Structure formats: structure tokens, C-alpha cells
Image (spheres, grey):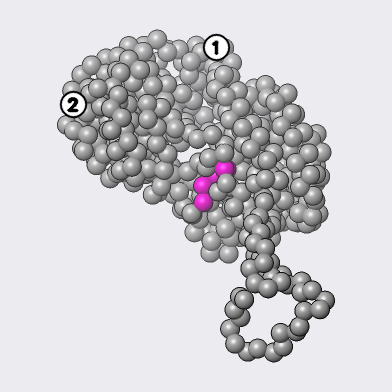
Amino acid sequence: MDVVTHWRAGERWTGSGDRLGDVYDPATGQVARQVALASAGDVEAVVSVAAEAGREWAAASLSRRTAVLFSFREVLARRRSEVAAAITAEHGKVLDDALGEVQRGLEVVEFACGAPHLLKGGFSDGVSTGVDVYSLRQPLGVVGVVSPFNFPAMVPLWFVPVAIACGNAVVLKPSEKDPSASLLLAEMWAEAGLPAGVFSVLQGDKVAVDGLLTHPDVKAVSFVGSTPVARYVYETGTAHGKRVQALGGAKNHMVVLPDADLEAAADAAVSAGFGSAGERCMAISALVCVDPVADALVPLIASRMAALVTGDGRRGCDMGPLVTGEHRAKVTSYVEAGVAAGASLVVDGREVVPTGEPGGFWLGPTLFDRVEPGMSVYDEEIFGPVLSVVRVATYDDALALVNANLYGNGTAIFTHDGGAARRFQREVEVGMVGINVPIPVPMAYYSFGGWKSSLFGDTHAHGTEGVHFFTRGKVVTSRWPSPDAPRAGVDLGFPQHE
């Protein structure tokens, strides 16, 4: 059986570890290949190569770095279908969705191509007699990126191009559930002319993550995953002196006011709730209907769900399987808990008839009505195709519900009332807000990230915040007096500008 390896010093590398993990085809339920799981020695071997390569890359000119980034952008655009096929084969999302994921990653690459502008400092001439002050930003060294299973290409591309543009060496630890896309990205970086060792892939599990979090040569770690793990990554990394940005989980609400276009709201709720089988950190999982919206909106949503085809993502369906059998069982347990708690099960995804192999990890789109806080189907992040309708009496009740939630990743409001929308964007305690846009993922030149338990650390992904995360600021004060200027002499007083 094929084994997905690490990438070290510009080539595939099996490592010294003897542990292997199974990688499934979610549409068949069968083990398709295995992945090497790094040992502590493998972590050391990869980081040592990255540290050496990173020192040379940090000294490379901005022109050279930018040339590599432009080349990588062209290679990735040309080979995007390969990456999408690998994503669908191991994650299960449909091919169109996988291609969209690669496209959103490309946008970050294009943003990073502007590194000469993004890394410009400031200059103040003559702040004192013969004295100038200027600032510059310099790379950190080796940085780690730990990415989740739901976006095996896009999430690494949120971080890696920006980090490399800033002059760092990067060690990527992809999810062991769908690791093949990471090696395709590594091949593309090599094809683009990136020096060997500047980008490495360390396959593995907690051993690899802990190795990056504690290794003294790793200066920063970017992480995306569940909130409990994000908290662990943040606390462990910072305890070892590292800069950490850890993006956690979400429970995204979509508020629908009585004046909204209900047909458009129904389309948005289905698209945002069930795309990628709900395995998105920006998926809408809680639909907050202000009375009397739900009575009309729930049937509209159910009718659209009836037309969705669940099946093998390579066969032209609407929604694919969940990533593993274990994850399917977990999501199904939430459906069972919702029924037991008294929520109204309008559409039961457990009864889906898929267009795929019977052993696939299938769960169809699921819709609950009359869900209330306190039910696990509402309180917890499910990360699957389960949409819960919560009924509230007023706008104020809707806002209070969203703000009381543990998470603050993304939210949306559907309305024709500009005043209500403006009030919502100011008052809601969430990091990314959509107005008649169900999934408000910003463009690459803005930064991505939430509030509250959806983010640990104070820096968001990509955009200018990403550039600042992967660099350190330095301020230089210089004096070049003219040859005939008198010497100032000894002065023990506090320096003053004159």
C-alpha cells in the first residue's frame, strides 16, 4: 500500500519512525493508502534542515523571493486540478468545492506576491539634528503551520505563502486524515524554484505537533482546528516562548429578520449549511429566525434540501461524505441527542440514499426546528451537515443569542433594513460579519479570524495581520553628522531631540 511520506530538503523522505496511519477514501469507506507518522527524531531532522535553509532564505532579496512566489502562483494555477482531485479522494468534498478551495488559496498567494510593498517600513528624516529614524520588518526564522482536515490546501495557503514571502522557513504539519495535498504543494514550491529546506512537510499526529510547539528553533506556530486543541496549542506554544495564532471552532449564526427576502435566505441557508458536508469552520449551523419568519422559511429550506444529491464527490453530486467513519458516528450522535432533547427533526439525513458505495461515510443534510440553547445540537460545534432553527421574538433577542455564544467566528444577517444591518454589524460580538452574505470569508488582503473562543492569540490569518505575525519589527535611529559639525561631548542627561 502506498505511504504518504514527509518532505525534507526538497524531496520525499520516509523518516525514521515506524508508525503508520490509515488514510480512507470517504466515498467507499476503504483504506486507500497510509501516512507516515513522525517520531520525535523526525521532528528534529526536519527542523534542523529548515533552520539552515531559513538563514539563507532570510538573506535573499525581496526581488528573489517575489520571483519565486510569482512562479509558484503559476504552477499552482496550472496544477490546481491535481490538488482538487487529491482533496476529493481523501476528504470527500465534491470536485467543484475542492477547486474553489484551491482558488481561495491562490488569492493569498497573489496577495503575498506584493511582499515588497507589504514589508516596507517607515522613514522619518531629520527627527533631530543629523538624526534619522526608520523601521523595518525582519523574518522570525523557522515557523510551523498545523492545518486541519477540512481544507487541506486552502488553510496551508493562508499561511505558507505569507511566511515564505516574509523570509521564513516553514514546516507544515497537515492533517493525517488527508495528507496527500501537502506533498503536491511541496512539489510545486520546488518547481517554482524555492530553495530546498525552506518548505518542509512533517506528517504525523500529536507527536509532530508537540515537537513543533516545544522545539527551540521553531519561533512561531499557526494553527487551525477545534477550540480545545487550539487552546492547548496556544498555551503550550506560548509557554515555550513562541508566537502563536490558534484559530479554533465556531457556531455560526445566520439571523433572518421578517423583512428579508425569504427565497434568498433559504438558498443561503442551504448553501452555507451543507456545503462541504458542513465541515467548514464558517458553515452556518444555527439559523435564528425572528418571528414569524420560521413558519414560512423552514418549509422553503426543506424543499431545497429534498433536491440535494449526496454521493461520491467525483460523480457530480451536490454533497459528499464525511471524512471518516468515526466523524460520521460523532455527528450522528448529535442528531440522536437533538431528537432526545425534544427538537423537531424536519429532515433526517440518516435516511439518505447516496449515489455511492454502501460503505461510504454517508450522512445527508439534516434540519432541526425549534432548537433551544441548552441542547447539545445548539451548544456544541457539530462540524457536519446539521442545520438548527432557533426561533426568537425580536431582533434584540437574536442579537443577545449570538452574543451569548461561546464562539465568535462568523455570523450573518438577512434583511432589507439598512439601519438594522448597520446596527447589527456594530453590536454583534463576532469577528467576521456578513450582511445578506451567509459565509463572510474576507478576501486575502483582509485578515481572517474570529473573536472569543474562536481565536487564541491576538493576530488573525493572512492580510496585513499575517505579515506582522511572520515578522518582527525593528526601529533604527541613525546619525550621520557632517564632517564640520561640532562634537556634542559627554552629556549624562536623558537624550532629547533638538
Does residue 8 show up magenta in the picture?
no
Residue at image point 42% right, 39% down: 432
The kind of residue on which mark 1 rests is Gly
Residue at image point 49% right, 54% down: 457
Does residue 462 show up magenta in the picture?
yes
Local SS, label 2: loop
According to the picture, the residue beneath numbered tag 2 turns out to be 291
Residue at image point 50% right, 20% down: 320
Instruction: Report whether 292 appears left or right of 244.
Output: left
Residue at image point 28% right, 22% down: 260
Which label number is shown at residue 389? none
Measured from the top left, where is residue 486 in percent x and y?
76, 83
User: Going from the N terminus, do you reach mark 1 or mark 2 first?
Assistant: 2
Local SS, label 1: loop
**Residue closer to the observer: 161 or 286:** 161
Bounds of the magenta segment = 459-463
Above or below for 445 versus 210: above
Magenta region's main secondary structure?
loop
The kind of residue on which mark 2 rests is Asp
Which label number is shown at residue 316? 1
Categorize mark 1 by other alpha carbons within 10 Å: few (<14), some (14-19), many (20+): some
Count of labels in the image: 2
Instruction: Report whether 9 appears left or right of 395.
Output: right
Measured from the top left, where is residue 299 in percent x and y?
27, 14
Above or below for 173 versus 433: below
For the C terminus, the image quarter is bottom right
Categorize mark 2 by other alpha carbons within 10 Å: few (<14), some (14-19), many (20+): some
